[in-house]
Amino acid sequence: HKRRGLDKKILGSYLHALVPVLLKGMVYSPLDLVLLGGDEEDADVPDKDSDIAPRHHSSRFNQADSWDDDDEDASYWNLRKCSASTLDQLATVYKNELLPILLPHLRNIIKSEQKWQVQEAGILALGAIAEGCFSGLEQHLPQLIQFLIAKLQDRYPLVRSITCWTLSRYSKWVVNESKGDDEKYFKPLVVNLLRAMHDKNKKVQDAACSAFACVEEEARGRLVPYLLPIVRRLVQASERYQAKNLLGLFDTIGTLAEAVGPALNQKVIVQTLMPPLMARCGQLKNNDRNIFPLLECLTSLAQALKSGFVPYARPLFNRALQIIQTTLMEQARNGISHVNDSEKEFIVASLDLLGGLTDGLGGTIESLVGNSNLLQLLFACVKDTDKDVRQSAFALLGDLSRVCIGHIKPHLNKFLPVAISAINQENDQYVIMNASWAVGEIALLCGGMMTKYMPALMKNLAKLIMHKNAPGDLLENIATTLGRIALVCPAVVAPDLHFFAKNWCTNLLRIEDDREKEHAYQGLCSVIHKNPKGIVKAIPELVDAIAAYDRPRNSMAIVFKRILVGLKQMLGQEWTKYFRGCDPRAYGVVARRYGL
């Protein structure tokens, strides 16, 4: 009914009859249990190749979320999944109105005397309504969380497994409710999920890994006091897991690195964690798709550990180059038409790993770059026909430019024309954004060396900033690059300011990153200084942009005041006419801050 836009009251009158049907449909059928299996102690049973679904690389630029419950092995859309998904949708639409109907049924079916299959369905239902009915459930969560944590010790593996998933749906509440008192809910949840990772059943192991990753994302710095025992348990699991769950464990380790960042860079933790992962990496062949989760994990670790990753950087750096070179050579030998998307993923995963190494190691990576054929391979990648390869290649070009521009400068005549040509509306959005960002990073460090490339670059940037239907994050990206170009070459940008001033100022409002925001505004002000008449018709948008810049550094505030006072003096009696079109709130903020 949600998709068809019907009044929710129409279906609401049937909820009393519908809810019991859905709950019954969520109970595993005998056929489900036969197909699903996994109701035994199978942790020591090696996985068959057919047990492991083909893995795909999850680019650090493209992340997607999807709703699912615990039984991913039952890949068909069965009655159980359909019923749980429908209950989730009902909770989203009816919210707390659903609870008086649903809760009496749930209280009954999760009683200890019920069959385990019925209890399991009740726990699934609790997870399904977690988001839609959260505010109404919150008063019950203290008892509910304790009940669920106890269920992690249930006799039946499928009950333990679904309990992990349901706990993950309430992890945000556990993290927030436990502030100042970890012993109450947070620590018991962490300890018991780590224990569940060592369950004798493979499905429970997998569900515990996924649930713990959700806790990591919510808890972030709260995990720091427990990092060493957490890492030890994860490493112990890596020594015990069969092939399939090992891939999920790599995701959990990578998520931990992203959650706690440099806090992970403690000598004892690094020495505990890295050698087993490096050994695993050495066991996987370059063309083994199971290497993707491990490379993604190592990418996150490189960014988190920074200097702590240096001892492990060279072999991974060389491995990434080897994978890229082998795939490119195969492409050249067999022709582009014979290289499929799955083979390109090996290049993308390797480029992303090199980007993580560059981000984590900073200038330390210079010696690796200087003694390799990385730039030769990178140039081939920025010209590749595959958009995902180009996207990751331009990102790596920008990363390298930030930390070792000396290696990039001799090759500007090759890279810049390709990057500039990629900044056009016919291209994939994320290719444009990464090419634009890379050009902006290069411009900051190369300044006058950019001059001969400016006409083509400005033409492409101006077209995009004026594009009416371009996505907001793309326009923010282009506004930032325009600012960086203007910062180093204001005389090139200033003559055309009147053409795109309104759109430029409007899209400056979107920028959140402090470094990029300051560059963009500094560039705008430099151009206004060169061509103040070019901004006159965009004064309302300029005022909005300056008002939106909260807490600028003192040097930036001085520039803003100089620009505004200068415009007021230049316009004289016409000042009032131009500023009449400003948003009153924004003008009031600017007037107070900058003494207008």
Image (spheres, rainbow, N blue to C red):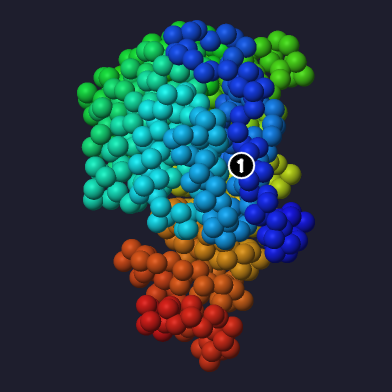
Image height of 531 relative to 149, above or below: below
Asked whether residue 113 is in view, the answer is: yes
Image height of 399 relative to 556, above or below: above
Closer to the camera in the image, 356 or 159:
159
Residue located 30% across and 37% down the image: 188
Q: 384 left or right of 198?
A: right
In the image, residue 23 lies at what x, y percent?
Answer: 61, 42
Instruction: Say what amino acid the circle numbered 1 marks.
Output: Leu
Q: Which residue is mark 1?
A: 23
Residue located 59% across and 9% down the image: 49
Asked whether residue 321 is in view, the answer is: no
In the image, residue 462 lies at what x, y percent?
Answer: 65, 56
Residue located 29% across and 48% down the image: 178
Q: Secondary structure at mark 1?
A: helix
In the image, residue 64 lies at what x, y percent?
Answer: 58, 39
In the image, residue 521 lies at what x, y percent?
Answer: 46, 62
Image quadrant in which you'd find residue 61: top right
Image height of 532 relative to 245, above or below: below
